[in-house]
Amino acid sequence: MAEEIQLYSPPNLEATERLNERSFWNKLNRFARRAGREVVEKALWLYYAYKRPETPAWAKRTILGALAYFILPVDAISDLLVGVGYTDDLTVLVFAVGTVAAYINPTVKEQARQKVIEWFGE
């Protein structure tokens, strides 16, 4: 007897909660210290790879999906939980990094490194 599969229906988000560049930078600015250097670095790698015109559309879609998960308030694990709140975000970001690694070149990594140093120090 086959079980019935229920489709996931995402919540209806207000316009201010939708993915955009401003919401990406706002979340990073507000939660960088809490999220940690590694989460921020991976998010920035993806962001700067996305901005490169050489990055193909399929890779940009993968990047957008990962960054949307990071930005939007709907998470598998609440970001407010101390110690584990960003583990799901990091997992999604690392998976996306692995998928689009060919487009994360030394220039992208250096841009991210400079921003991480600006926020966290050496």
Image (cartoon, rainbow, N blue to C red):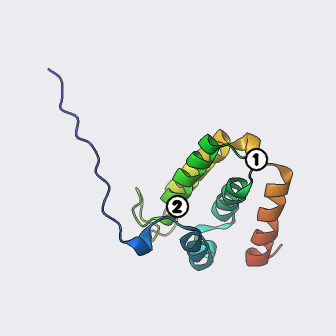
Report the amino acid beneath label 1.
Answer: Glu
Instruction: Identify residue for label 2.
Output: 70
For marks 2 and 1, the one nearer the N-term is 1
Q: Quadrant of the C terminus?
A: bottom right
> Which label sits on residue 54?
1
Name the residue at 43% across, 71% down: 17
Frontmost residue, 53 versus 46: 53
Name the residue at 55% across, 73% down: 27
Name the residue at 56% across, 58% down: 67
Q: Secondary structure at mark 1?
A: loop
Give the vertical position of 2 relative to 79 (above or below): above
Give the vertical position of 61 relative to 19 (above or below): above
Q: Quadrant of the N terminus?
A: top left
Residue 53 location, x and y as percent?
74, 52
Residue 26 location, x and y as percent?
57, 77
10 Å crowding of disc 1: few (<14), some (14-19), many (20+): few
> Which label sits on residue 100?
none
Q: Secondary structure at mark 2?
A: helix
10 Å crowding of disc 2: few (<14), some (14-19), many (20+): many
Looking at this view, name the residue that lies furthest to the left: 1
Frontmost residue, 19 versus 101: 19
Of badges 2 and 1, nearer the viewer stands 1
Residue 43 location, x and y as percent?
64, 60
Report the amino acid beneath label 2.
Answer: Phe
Determine the CA span between mark 2 and mark 1: 24 Å
